[in-house]
């Protein structure tokens, strides 16, 4: 029995030895772990004090290699939950919920994080009148930050009813017709080729003016047609 006790104690010490620093929680688990490389790992509890009139709060969640991952919850000093956020690659991703200090839901946000390994990401643009219909695909550059993406809802925290809503496509506010405000950075892509459509594609599909079409129809079948092409006609002899 004594040998077994010593063995268990050895395992426990070895386990703690892999952390550069940590704290012991009220349940005896290790929190706020920092590994030997100086990276935050595992469950963390962070206390943020009051600052410049802003109320203090506590937040808890998980770190993976110094980045927030999964669900993080924020609580007021009186224990009321004021936020529930979801992270991926250390950035907001998916649904986020924010509450008043009395516990009423005030806002629901939708975000999208892009894998840091990818320089670009491709997302669908949905029809606001028919959410099951995809209007087009959009390609965006990965700037290393999370982007507003999806439906945002604003609530009356007392009644719990929706007061307003917005739809974003990678930080761009979508209008009823599917276009985006400030959409100069979002361009449709050719899905078959997996790249942006070039401006030359639009040039090739430009329709001829009606006067040209009438002229070609009038002179169709003729062998020689004298056409003004902008040249002077006085070409130098070879």
Image (spheres, helix red, strand yellow):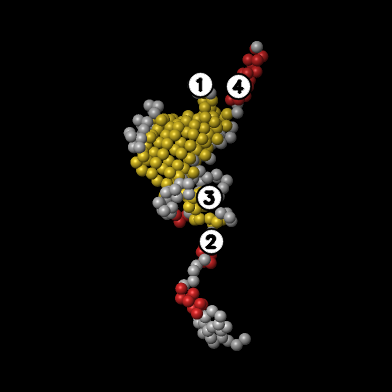
State which quadrant residue 8 falls in: top right
> Cα distance, mark 3 to mark 1?
44 Å
Q: Earlier in the sequence, mark 4 or mark 2?
A: 4
> Cα distance, mark 4 to mark 1?
16 Å
In the depicted structure, whether residue 56 falls above or below residue 216? above
> Cα distance, mark 4 to mark 2?
62 Å
Q: Which residue is mark 1?
A: 27
Query: In terms of depth relative to the viewer, which is nearer, 199 or 1?
Result: 199
Q: Quadrant of the N terminus?
A: top right
In the depicted structure, whether residue 193 falls above or below residue 110? below
| Residue extending furthest toward the left | 158
Mark 4 near mark 2, Cβ–Cβ under 8 Å? no
Report helix, strand or loop for mark 2: loop
Question: Few, some or many C-alpha atoms within 10 Å of disc 4 (few <14, some 14-19, many ≥20)?
Answer: few
Q: Which mark is residue 122?
A: 3
> Cα distance, mark 2 to mark 3?
17 Å
Q: Which residue is mark 4?
A: 12
Report whether residue 138 is seen.
Answer: no
Mark 3 near mark 4, Cβ–Cβ under 8 Å? no
Residue shown at the point (41%, 39%) measured from the top left:
108
Residue 40 lies, in percent from the top left, at 54, 33
Q: Earlier in the sequence, mark 2 or mark 3?
A: 3
Residue 5 lies, in percent from the top left, at 63, 15
Q: Earlier in the sequence, mark 3 or mark 4?
A: 4
Q: Earlier in the sequence, mark 4 or mark 1?
A: 4
Report whether residue 153 is seen.
Answer: yes
Report helix, strand or loop for mark 3: strand
Q: Which mark is residue 198?
A: 2
Residue 30 lies, in percent from the top left, at 54, 25
Closer to the observer: label 3 or label 4? 3
């Amino acid at each position: 029995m004594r040998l077994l006790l010593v063995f268990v104690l050895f395992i426990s010490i070895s386990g703690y030895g892999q952390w550069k620093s940590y704290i012991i929680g009220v349940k005896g688990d290790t929190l706020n772990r920092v590994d030997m490389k100086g990276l935050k790992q595992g469950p963390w509890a962070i206390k943020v004090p009051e600052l410049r009139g802003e109320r203090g709060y506590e937040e808890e969640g998980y770190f993976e290699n110094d980045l927030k991952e999964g669900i993080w919850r924020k609580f007021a000093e009186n224990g009321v939950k004021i936020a529930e956020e979801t992270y991926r690659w250390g950035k907001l991703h998916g649904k986020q919920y924010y509450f008043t200090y009395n516990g009423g839901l005030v806002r629901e946000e939708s975000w999208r994080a892009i894998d840091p390994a990818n320089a670009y990401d491709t997302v669908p643009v949905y029809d606001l009148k028919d959410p099951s219909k995809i209007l087009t695909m959009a390609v965006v550059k990965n700037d290393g930050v999370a982007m507003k993406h999806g439906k945002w809802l604003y609530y009356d925290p007392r009644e719990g009813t929706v007061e307003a809503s917005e739809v974003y496509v990678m930080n761009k506010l979508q209008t009823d017709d599917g276009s985006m405000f400030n959409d100069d950075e979002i361009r449709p892509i050719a899905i078959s080729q997996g790249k942006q459509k070039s401006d030359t594609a639009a040039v090739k599909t430009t329709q001829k003016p009606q006067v040209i079409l009438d002229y070609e129809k009038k002179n169709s079948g003729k062998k020689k047609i004298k056409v003004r092409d902008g040249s002077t006609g006085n070409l130098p002899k070879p």
